[in-house]
Amino acid sequence: MRCCMSDNASYAAQIAGDADPQPWTAPQPRELSALRRALAEQMRSPYERQTLAQLLRTNTGTLRPRTGDLARDAEIMLDQEHMRLSSAVLYYVTEDMTRLARAAATTLPVHSFHPQDVPAQYGFLVFGEPIAAYHPEPAPDEVVTIVAASWGPLDSLMPGPPGVWVTFWSMTDFEHDAALLHQHGVPLRQARDRVRALRAELTWDNEVTLRYGAAELAVLRHRDTGGPDVRTTDLDTDDGGWEQIRDTTVAWAHILRATWLLMTQTGVTDVDEHRLSRTVRRHAERQGYNPADIRVVRIRHRDNIPTTSEPATERTYRVRWTVRGHWRNQWYPSRNEHRPVWINPHIKGPENAPLRTGDTVHVLDDEHHP
């Protein structure tokens, strides 16, 4: 919780500027179970409780139980995150799939958020590449790199309509934190050992809340009194809206929602299940962690961009051309509403016509589409 959060995904005004992400070596899918366990245990540490209580004391964030006791608020939130991580289905999103999600998020249409858009009630998802980076205040030389997300039901913590509470996780910069201790007189080797003992591989960074049925963004900022100042704004990503939100938590939520939408579409992605070893599974069960298979989300491999022949019309085309990947609103009678569906890049035009060159083709997979 480094800065303020959202209701339906809000602006986080403190996150600004274009920062280059830190180098990120994502864990292997088989390592996600151990990473999840380490993060869940971190939520029980005195250091984490003290840190969160201090952040709440500075009026950082709006997602809190508001019991009147900041230490109790921190305890409840960390207990909730521990439970969410323990119950989570584990997901690993490959590098090329992460790139697609980032690209697709820039044009994701505003649409009503539905429970069926969430792949699991509780989840922990690690991206193969960073999805965002920013310079935090008041440390402009530091770079925070967002690489993972967890989620669970919102109604366990906040009143109002049901929805999802999403936590975003950043890489823990052990060297940076050790250097800060070293500046205060702690020997560097001792500082490194201390930071490693206190911190997990990832750090709880920011949250957003997504209310079911919402189709607008609610912007929450703090007043001096501590209460949120709420207004709503329509977001039109097809009309430059992405530039408006690209350095905020709204963008992170768009990337996650694009990932959720893409991973449920046949013909776009494959979700492979990696079974935990018997030893790891039994240990997870004994420790109270969800032993479900790890889901690996990847782009469905294709040897070539498919060609779509044009039906006979009054207009005659003499060339073929490429159509970039894009969203299309498709009507779902079961929901009585539209839902974004991703359309893969394809070639249109008469089958034997020459291919028009010079246009950019939206590349999905570096390995199969040089």
Image: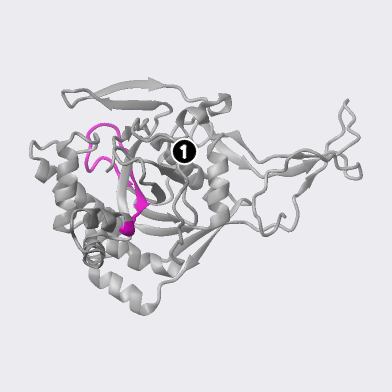
Q: For residue 300, which quarter of the picture?
A: bottom right
Residue 107 placement (x, y as % from top left): 56, 34
Helix, strand or loop under label 1: loop
Q: Which residue bears the numbered disc 1? A: 18
Q: Does the magenta segment cover residue 61?
A: no
Q: Is residue 146 above or below residue 254?
A: below
Q: Quadrant of the C terminus?
A: bottom right
Q: Residue furthest bottom?
A: 279
Q: Amino acid at mark 1?
A: Asp
At 71% from the left and 54% from the top, the residue drawn is 369
Q: Does the magenta segment cover residue 167?
A: yes
Say left or right for 166 vs 361. left
Please give the range of residues in magenta.
152-175
Q: How many marks?
A: 1
Q: For residue 361, which quarter of the picture?
A: top right
At 11% from the left and 41% from the top, the residue drawn is 70
Residue 362 placement (x, y as % from top left): 68, 43
Q: Quadrant of the N terminus?
A: top left
Q: Is residue 65 visible?
A: no
